[in-house]
Every structure is written in structure tokens, then in C-alpha cells.
Amino acid sequence: MSIDKVKGKFVLEYHLYNQFYRKSIFAVLILGILTALIFLFASFYFENFIVEQTHLIAEQMLDDKEEPANIQKFYSILLNNLFIGLMIILCGFIPVYGLPFIYGLLSFASVGIVAGYGVIMNHNVLQTMVVAFLPHAVIEIIPILYSVAIGMYVNKNMFYKVFHRKKNSEKFKGMLRQGITSYIVIIIPLFILAALVEAFITSRLVDIFL
């Protein structure tokens, strides 16, 4: 692929970001933070259930395998994140309005639940979040939000195409092609970087400070 074609793809990507993606990114970020706070406080009302389920998950993880090497962690984290990003985008092709948005909010809800569990167990949640979460999360959140934005762009067009028969909605092949392009040039590189940080840097910080 020539440099001009690569440049053209990034120019188109930036245009789509300004025209469509940006609003969805900031909307899900703001609502996601509120969702995390809601689930944080809600976890206190389901204290016994959350503690029980967390212990069960921890026991299963300990019984399955020994501690994986950093390179194994990297591949596991990367594949999991790539799958999540892809699923969020593919949800957009289902003509039920808002599915990718809901999927994105669930990611924030899980953070709220984990933080709530930490408070319940009297852990130093702030220190844990800064050391074990923040270093890779600030990178990882970008491709997740971007996946939601792509999914919502596709979802909106699919919804209007199916239920409103709008002729000016994007064609299916065009949306699929653009979604794949965005996934390759934006989402995959950022998920790779986030997985590298989580596997090799965050794990080291956890060993030192926690």
C-alpha cells in the first residue's frame, strides 16, 4: 500500500471522527463515569453476593493454572481486548438502536463493581487503581470508546436503513469496509500498546507497590 493511500485512510478517519465519532466518544465517556459511580455505590447493597462471586472467580483462576509469564499475559490480554472491540463494532450491525453504547457502559459498570469490592474488603482502592489499573487503562479506554463510536455510527445507519428506509444512509459494504479500516489503523495498535503496558509495566508495578 502506497504512502498516499495510507495518508488518505487517516484523513478519512479524521473526517469521520470529527463528523460522527467524537460525539459518541464523549457521550459514552461521561455516561460511563456516571455508570461506574452508580455501580460502585450499588455494590454496597449487594455486598454478600459480590464478595461470594468474586471469591468463586478467584478460586477458579487459582485452580486452573500457575501464574502465566508476561508474554502469555500479553497475548491473553490482547486477544481478549481485540475480541471485545470487534464485538462492540459488530453489535452495530444489529438494528437495535444503542446496542454498542450499552456494551460500552457495561465496561464502566465492571470497573465500578471492582472498585466497590475493594472498598468492601477494606483495600486501599485509590492506591490499587493508580498502580494496577491507571497505567494501562488510560490507553485501553481509547480503543474501547472508539469501538463504541464506530459501532454507533454503523448502528444508527442500520437502524434508519431498516426501519425508516432512508436512502441517504450508508451502504452496508461501505460501513463494513470503513469499520474494518478503523479497527486496523486505530483500534488494533492502541490495544497492542495497552496490552504491552498491562503485561510488562503494570504487573511490575503491582509486584513492587502492592
Image (cartoon, rainbow, N blue to C red):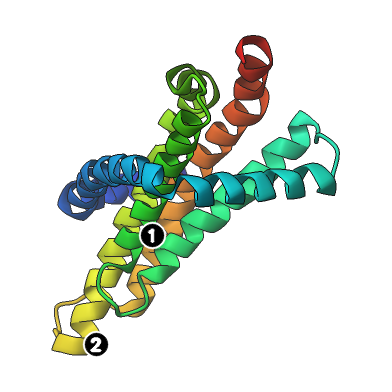
Secondary structure at badge 1 equals helix
Whether residue 17 is situated above or below residue 172 in the rendered picture: above
Question: Mark on residue 162?
Answer: 2
CA neighbours of label 2 inside 10 A, class few (<14), some (14 to 19), many (20+)? few
119 lies left or right of 68: left
Q: Is residue 170 visible?
A: no
Task: Work out how far the residue at label 1 is from the one at label 2, CA to CA, in angstroms.
Answer: 21 Å
Q: Which residue is mark 1?
A: 103
Tell me which amino acid carries mark 1: Tyr
Whether residue 61 is situated above or below residue 67 in the rendered picture: below
- Percent coordinates x, y for residue 71 in the rendering: 76, 33
* Residue shown at 48% from the left, 39% from the top: 114
- Percent coordinates x, y for residue 90 in the rendering: 44, 68
Secondary structure at badge 2 equals helix
206 lies left or right of 184: right
> Which image quadrant for residue 159?
bottom left
Q: Is residue 28 visible?
A: yes
- Percent coordinates x, y for residue 28 in the rendering: 26, 49
Q: Earlier in the sequence, mark 1 or mark 2?
A: 1
Tell me which amino acid carries mark 2: Val
Q: Which quadrant: the C terminus?
A: top right
> Which image quadrant for residue 76?
top right
